[in-house]
Amino acid sequence: MSIAEEVKKLLAPLADPARAAGMSAYMREQFAFYGIPTPARRAALKPLVRALKGVDAGVLLGAAGALWQEPQRECQYAAIDLLAAHVKQFDGRHIEALLALARQASWWDTVDALAVVIGTVVRADRLLRQALMDEAVRHADLWTRRVAMLHQLGWRADTDMGRLFGYAERLAHEEDFFIRKAIGWGLRDYARHDPNAVRDFLLAQGDSLSALTRREAGKHLDKQK
């Protein structure tokens, strides 16, 4: 039995049609769901995730790719759980494959979770791997650009401030809600570490940043004066 088949075998008995309808409605009816809450999903998959310790990165990516083809959204969530649990198996050679997942059945839920996985891989050797994010921020696919904008979430002192602000400037002209939100989120996150730098950046950029971006970026700045 493949990893993807094992995942489905573990999840299917937990299906709750009533809950599934609500979850699908929340996601604008874009995806089908089993109707499994996150804690229950993770508890059911925990033994399998543990058993995969040391499995080759290619096998994990193959399993993730297979799960991405399943109609139930929890299968994509399970794939991300597997990738996140074994993130140390991945290196720069695997970043494009992870980005490719972000471009399939794309919405903020899976894309943002993959941004964390990708960011963890990049951070492990950021001097070499962040150049791949420089390519990602120029990609034609908006979700790939969103990953690039968000990949440094939580990095604090490790954040490449030039890239953070440079990406924000590069994407500032875009009108897409998810890009504007991502810029603001990235800036707000870094403001927890260096509020003055973010405050100065917002001041310098003025109206070149959307109102949404500025609102998101400045949420906690008043408290940090």
Image (tube, rainbow, N blue to C red):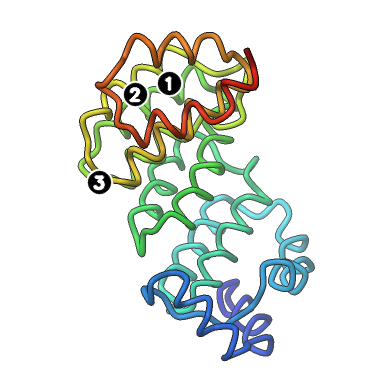
In x, y percent, where is residue 151? 48, 34
Residue drawn at (59%, 53%) of the image: 83
The residues bearing labels 2 and 3 have C-alpha atoms spaced at a distance of 15 Å
Q: Position of residue 56 (x, y in %)?
A: 60, 52
Q: Which mark is residue 164?
A: 1
Q: If you read the primary sequence from the N terminus, does the residue marked by circle 2 or circle 3 appear first?
A: 3
- Residue 77 position (above or below residue 206): below
Query: Label 3, on which residue?
Result: 141
Q: Are marks 1 and 2 in contact (CB under 8 Å)?
A: yes
Q: Amino acid at mark 3?
A: Asp
From the viewer's perspective, tell me whether residue 68 is left or right of residue 156: left
Q: Residue at x 60, y 71 (%)?
A: 3
* Contact flag, marks 2 and 3 (Cβ < 8 Å): no
Q: Amino acid at mark 1?
A: Leu
| Viewer-side residue, 114 vs 179 | 179
Q: Amino acid at mark 2?
A: Tyr
- Element carrying mark 2: helix
Q: Position of residue 150 (x, y in %)?
A: 46, 35
Residue depicted at x 48% and y 30%: 186
Instruction: Answer with mark 1 or mark 3, whichever residue precedes in sequence.
Output: 3
Per the image, the residue denoted by label 2 is 167
Residue 162 falls in which quadrant of the image?
top left
